[in-house]
Amino acid sequence: MSMATQLTNVSGAMDAIAKWDDLPPELWPKIGKSLHHHVDLLRFRSVCNSWRSSIPPSLPNSPSLFPLQIPHPNNPSMFVFLTHSSVYRIEPPQQPSSSSSSPKSWLIKLEGHSNPSESRLLRLLNPISDQKISIPQSSSPRMLNLLDYRVVELHKSYALQNFGFPVKKVVFFPTSCWFNVEDSVACCIYQEGKLALFKRGDNKWTLLDDKNFHYDDLIVYKGQIYVTDRWGTISWIDTCSLKLIQYSPPLCGLGHKKHLIESCENLYVVDRYYNSEPRWAWPHNEASVVDFKVYRLDEEWGTWVDVKDLKDTVFLLGDSCSFSVCANDFAGYAGNCIFFTDVSSDGVYNLGDGSIMTYKLGPSSSKLFWPPPSWLKFKGRNRSKNI
């Protein structure tokens, strides 16, 4: 058989399998159950009526179940609401092959409403400060049909509403849409650095460490909940025994706050330095960010590796979640940088030269994420499909 004939046969085979609705029916639910993000499941169900009927419209851990009412950590007779939000990369529609340049993606955060009676409403948020992005009244959009674009969920984040005390971080586990929310756990760092865990169905939270009140950050990494304290010692939480198991040695960094972040399947700690010691009640009061140090955990040897160059990667350190993106995917982003937020400003730190550029919080600070690119089209409520 000639090479040309082989290529023709391969091309024909590719054309055949490209018709997704012709796949055997027994594969439909298997494909659907391999998708763990809500947006991916929406796209799966939009292929055709047969695919839509192969999986239920409401899943055990759907965003529609939020906010969840749970007991207050300090007073079980009171309740707080666990809210859910997600950071998305919205990619432009496919461009013609003749296009000279390809447009960049848009990074945005969407939060479900904290009021249970309005849980179907979403708000646009600054992905690092969590501040609501104000949309001009003259151009206020009503609906965005995400099925018109390629949407990738980059990160989930959670918050406790009506808490009454400073909350440093909240994680919820597991996060898959298919996992029953009744089998879930929430873990939070609150006040000056107390660490507590709540199992769904319990009447109260459990304080995990009554000797160390200096925890800084939490992360769900490779199917486990990890926590770091002020000294950079990482532990993972056994949710069955409610024990902390030390996972790494203390970090040599002398910064004031440690951030956990996953990037390319590696675990990093970003050490934040202030010009003065911050107080827990006002975590950044009268203190300004002056430096960052980055370390990667070598899990095989249990040692910390000093990182001087993130290449094309950008770290985003948010109030409710930290994550990484590729700078080339977004307009105006530069690699080897750290985006962060403080009490009065957003900032961009260049790991290469140590420079810091700040933006005062408010309408101007949103320019990193707003306005959206010109290819993104908002539509009126009566003309757009609500997904």
Image (cartoon, rainbow, N blue to C red):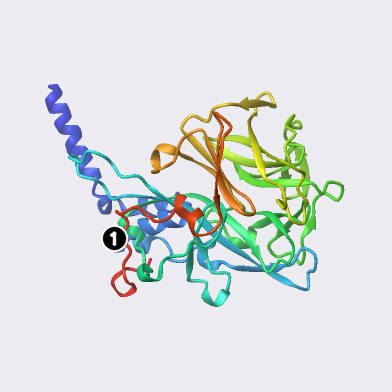
Q: Position of residue 308 (x, y in %)?
A: 58, 26
Q: Is residue 320 visible?
A: no
Q: Please rate how many residues cluster around mark 1, counting C-alpha atoms within 10 Å: few if below 14, some from 14 to 19, many from 20.
A: few
Q: Nearer the viewer, residue 262 or 199?
A: 262
Who's the residue at 55% across and 29% down the image? 353
Who's the residue at 40% across and 71% down the image? 137
Q: Nearer the viewer, residue 269 or 221?
A: 269
**290 lies left or right of 142:** right
Q: Is residue 199 visible?
A: yes
Q: Position of residue 277 (x, y in %)?
A: 77, 44
Who's the residue at 44% across and 41% down the image? 333
- In the image, residue 84 sits, relative to residue 225, either above or below, namely below
Q: In the structure shown, which secondary structural element does the residue marked by tag 1 occupy? A: loop
Residue identifier under label 1: 48
**169 lies left or right of 26:** right
Q: Nearer the viewer, residue 290 or 197?
A: 290
